[in-house]
Image (spheres, coloured by chain):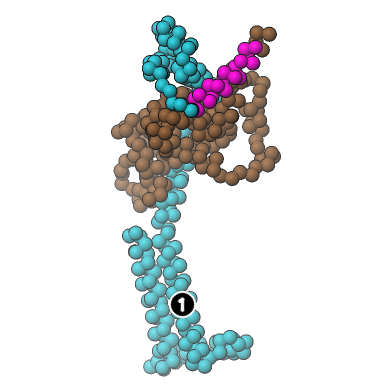
Chain colours: A brown, B cyan
Amino acid sequence: MPWEFTLPNALLHTSPGGALEAAAGACDPAMENEAFAAFYSRSSRPLWAYLARSSSDPALADDLMQESYVRFLCAAGAPSLAADGEAAARLYLFRIASNLLRDYWRRPRAASIEEIPEEFFAAHGHAAQTDTQILLEPALRQMKPRERQLLWLAHAEGYSHREIAQVMGLSAASIRLLLFRARRKIAALLRASAAPEMLGRKS
Amino acid sequence: MMLTSCPHEKEVRQLIARGQWSAASPPALRAHVTGCRTCGDLVLVSEAFQQARVESAAAARPVPPALLLWRAQLRRRNAAMERITRPLLGAQIFACAVVVFAALGFAGFEARSGVDWFTWNFWRDWFVELPQAAASQWASLSAGPLTGSAWSWLVLGSALATLLLLGGAAVYFATDKQ
């Protein structure tokens, strides 16, 4: 069954109504709005951070974040906020976002320079960068997309290997090794980029 | 690359997760982290990513949740509409196919009985004689008992209409159940 046809369990409820209303699951909007708004306010910023850092593209992160929430609301197998808890719902949301990122990277792209918005360049400017951006951003750019996702989920979101495996669709055993390698690689890159920085500050 | 683990890794990880590194960590553990590559990497990477998370989260500009709810509802409605109209479309396609099939059969039958459909003269005569033929058919129908030719047209038309109606309904119910 396509995911559009049913509401997620998070917002599932029954009420009398027409065939179209029942099929669309549009009932008790006040309850739906409240539950979703609370969940959204707590999860949207971490999700955006994950997407923006994994893709290195804030505009893409905006789009994918919105699409992730819309898919979450329409998904048939989404965990219930009341029964499964917010942690499970958040994990499911990150899984949707990871799938969208993967689809984006798989898609062939052919964008001309005129099509890229001004904000993209403004966001990548070097005028007001923090230490983290100066050190972490170049290191992240040298990592593979999957490594960036793994590192972010493990060290920024604090997910366990089992949870990362759920989000990424990989086995928990392989996560341990992949994460170890990625951590070692980025640690070396961070140390390498921090050394000239320190020398510059001393002189 | 060898997967090496350190017995202190779990402890260091827990302190980082609670936000207690390095203020609340014992001096012996801090000294260990300075010399251990696994724990050193863990601390370095975790601190960098957690700082980046704070900065990125502050830079996020989430849209109002009502907009996303509206978009989701619109998408569900469109999907539901598509689901409802799909059997109707199937029935229409089936009905069109039956009409085309019947028309071809009829044309073939007429061609066998000597009518040449694919000539210019036939269609010119047909258009010229159509009003006269229709008038005479109507006169024969309203005047009294039907002739053999009028009966055949009436039966054929009724059968075709019934077939289309029943066929469309059958396809609709079959697709709807599925």
Query: What secondary structure characterizes most of the magenta part?
Result: helix
Q: Position of residue B107 (x, y in %)?
A: 50, 84
Which residue corresponds to the image point at 47% horizontal and 84% vertical from the top-left?
A: B106
Q: Based on the picture, tell me whether residue A104 belongs to the magenta stretch.
A: no
Amino acid, disc 1:
Phe
User: Chain for mark 1?
Assistant: B
Number of numbered discs visible in the structure rendering: 1
Q: Position of residue A173 (x, y in %)?
A: 39, 32
Q: Nearer the viewer, residue A146 or B101?
A: A146
Q: Nearer the viewer, residue A168 or A177?
A: A177
Dividing the picture into quadrants, the one containing residue B3 is: top left
**Residue farthest front in this picture:** B2
Q: Nearer the viewer, residue B11 or A34?
A: B11
Q: Which residue is mark 1?
A: B101
Q: Position of residue B160 (x, y in %)?
A: 41, 79
Q: Position of residue A54 (x, y in %)?
A: 53, 31
Which residue corresponds to the image point at 35% horizontal and 48% vertical from the top-left?
A: A22
Q: Could one spot residue A151 in this view of the protein?
A: no
A2, above or below A148, in the image: below
Which residue corresponds to the image point at 39% horizontal and 36% vertical from the top-left?
A: A171
Q: Could one spot residue B162 in this view of the protein?
A: yes
A71, above or below B99, in the image: above
Dividing the picture into quadrants, the one containing residue A125 is: top right
Secondary element type, mark 1: helix
Which residue corresponds to the image point at 46% horizontal and 12% vertical from the top-left?
A: B33
Q: Which residues are magenta?
A: A181-199
Q: Based on the picture, tell me whether residue A193 belongs to the magenta stretch.
A: yes
